[in-house]
Structure formats: C-alpha cells, structure tokens
Amino acid sequence: MILHGFAHKLGDDINTDYIISGKYKFNTLDMKELARHIFEDIEPNFIDKIKPGDIIVAGRNFGCGSSREQAPLVIKNAGLSAVVASSFARIFYRNAINNGLPLVECDTSRIQDGDELEIDLENGVVRDLTGGFEMGINPLPPFMMKLLQDGGLVEHFKKYGGFSIG
C-alpha cells in the first residue's frame, strides 16, 4: 500500500475538537457534511486547501482529547489519505485503524507544509519527494494492513464474516 499526496502541516497537541469542532459533531451523522468543517477552528476553510490523497503532518500527541470516532472518519471523508505525526493519542490511533485511516509515527520535523510525500506502509518508508529524503518507519503488522486494505474493521467483518488476517 503506497500513499501519495501533499503535506498539510499542523503543530503539536491537535485534539479531536480541532479535527471536528464540537459545535458540529452532535448535529449530524453525515461524515461528508462534517468533513466540510475539518480543522475549521485552526484554519477556516481548511477543506478548500486539500486535494484527495493529501496527507496531514503533525507533531506530537495528535488526536488527543475525546475518543469519539468522528475525528478519524472526518479526516478520511475529507479525502485525506493518512496522518503522519511524531506521536498519536492511543485511543485515536486505535479508532483510526479500526476505521481504515492509515497513521504513521515518525519524526516530522523535516517535513514542510506543501511537501510532496510518498508513504510505503508495507515496506516502512516515508519519502519526502520535495525535500529529497526518506525515513524508515516500523511497517504495520499484517493484520493492521489487512484492516486498512479492507477499509476498516466493520468492512473487514462484512467481507469475512469475522476477524481474519489470513
């Protein structure tokens, strides 16, 4: 699984209310509608800057705050292909993988806003095509890759009638 897109760089401690403001997440279950308001409290009209496949790049503790599943679903429904961060809040990490959103932990300090990135999840490499460097990452375990390829845990269960990594 190779992902390709342009970096949209954010800082440290991006909480789930920054991803999707609480003023929206209780009004609808329509993730496409919620995605229109992604990162709105950090940067109004953020949705207008992104293209399908683009990648969020952040510092440490991405996804802290509440454990609601809307946050990774909004990122995915906005058309973003992955989040690369120095570290993730554990519950966000689990919710993201369960919902089919790839996450990559690595040092993001050299990645600049707008850099063209390529992420090879299976071989464990992040390439910054603009900056001309690459970083090794821990490849995802096969069961996580399978969940991501299937679109998340629910889609995986629908496909196999249960949990199967074979």
Image: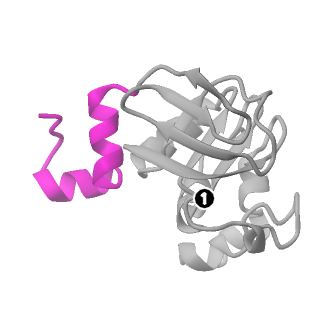
Which residue position holds label 1?
Answer: 75
Please give the name of the residue rendered at 78% of the width and 43% of the height, measured from the top-left corner: 14
Q: Position of residue 81 (x, y in %)?
A: 53, 54
Does dot 1 land on a helix, a strand or a loop?
helix
Residue at 68 percent of width and 48 percent of height: 56
Compared with 24, 161 (above or below) is above
Q: Nearer the viewer, residue 21 or 106?
A: 106
Q: Residues within 10 Å of mark 1 (few under 14, many from 20)?
A: many
Q: Which residues are magenta?
A: 140-166
- The part of the image, by quadrant, that contains residue 36 is bottom right
> What is the x, y in percent for residue 23?
78, 70
The location of residue 136, given as percent across then percent down, is 54, 20
**Which residue is situated farthest in the front direction here?**
132
Viewer-closest of 149 and 28: 149
159 is higher (above) or lower (below) than 61: below
**As displayed, is residue 92 above or below residue 27?**
above
Question: Can residue 133 be seen from the camera position used here?
Answer: yes
